[in-house]
Image (spheres, rainbow, N blue to C red):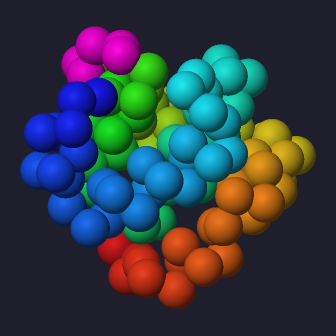
């Protein structure tokens, strides 16, 4: 992500990118990908999640958007174990502080 695109990000995007970079570095493991989508769904629109994850992983936005829709609809199931594991990773990266700035959708 270039510096100009970082400057153009909303406060939500900046804080979320920071948390995800602390949690995962430069690559989100495929094993955490769907659970991460599920963890973000209460706090962002489908489009915002797709834009964010596509920019982080350099993945086509349309592919990520379809994945977000599938998780939201329950077509891709995320177990409570998977979600809890990802939430533990996010908590170590500042998830609880990040939540204080979020408004659930």
Q: Nearer the viewer, residue 67 or 31?
A: 31
Q: Judge left or right: residue 88 versus residue 6.
A: right
Quick check: can you spot residue 9? yes
Q: Which residues are magenta?
A: 58-62
Name, please, the residue furthest toward the bottom: 100
Residue 64 picture location, percent across and down: 36, 24
Residue 22 placement (x, y as % from top left): 63, 48
Looking at this rendering, what residue extends furthest in the front direction?
3
Nearest the eye: 63 or 92: 92
Residue 10 relative to residue 89: left or right: left
Q: Residue at x 69, y 31 (%)?
A: 32
Magenta region's main secondary structure? loop
Q: How many marks?
A: 0
Q: Position of residue 8 (x, y in %)?
A: 11, 50
Q: Nearer the viewer, residue 34 or 13?
A: 13
Residue 8's place in the image compared with 96, above or below, is above
Above or below, comparing residue 22 to residue 88 in the picture: above
Residue 80 visible somewhere in the drawing: no
Screen quadrant of the N terminus: top left
The residue depicted at 67 percent of the width and 45 percent of the height is: 23
- Residue 50: quadrant of the picture: top left
Query: Residue at position x 42%, y 78% from top?
Result: 102
Question: Which image quadrant: the C terminus?
Answer: bottom left
In terms of image quadrants, where is residue 65?
A: top left
Question: Residue 67 location in percent, x, y?
Answer: 43, 26
Residue in the image at 24% along x and 19% along y: 62
Horizontal side of residue 104 vs 40, given as left or right: left
Residue 29, placed above or below residue 70: above
Q: Is residue 23 above or below residue 25?
A: below
């Amino acid at each position: 992500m270039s510096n100009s695109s970082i400057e153009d990000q909303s406060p939500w995007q900046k804080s979320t990118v920071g948390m995800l970079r602390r949690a995962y570095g430069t690559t989100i493991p495929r094993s955490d990908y769907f659970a991460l989508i599920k963890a973000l769904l209460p706090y962002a629109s489908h489009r915002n999640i797709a834009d964010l994850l596509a920019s982080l992983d350099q993945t086509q936005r349309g592919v990520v958007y379809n994945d977000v829709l599938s998780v939201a609809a329950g077509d891709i199931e995320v177990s409570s174990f998977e979600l809890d594991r990802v939430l533990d990773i996010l908590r170590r990266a500042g998830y609880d502080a990040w939540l204080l700035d979020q408004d659930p959708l």
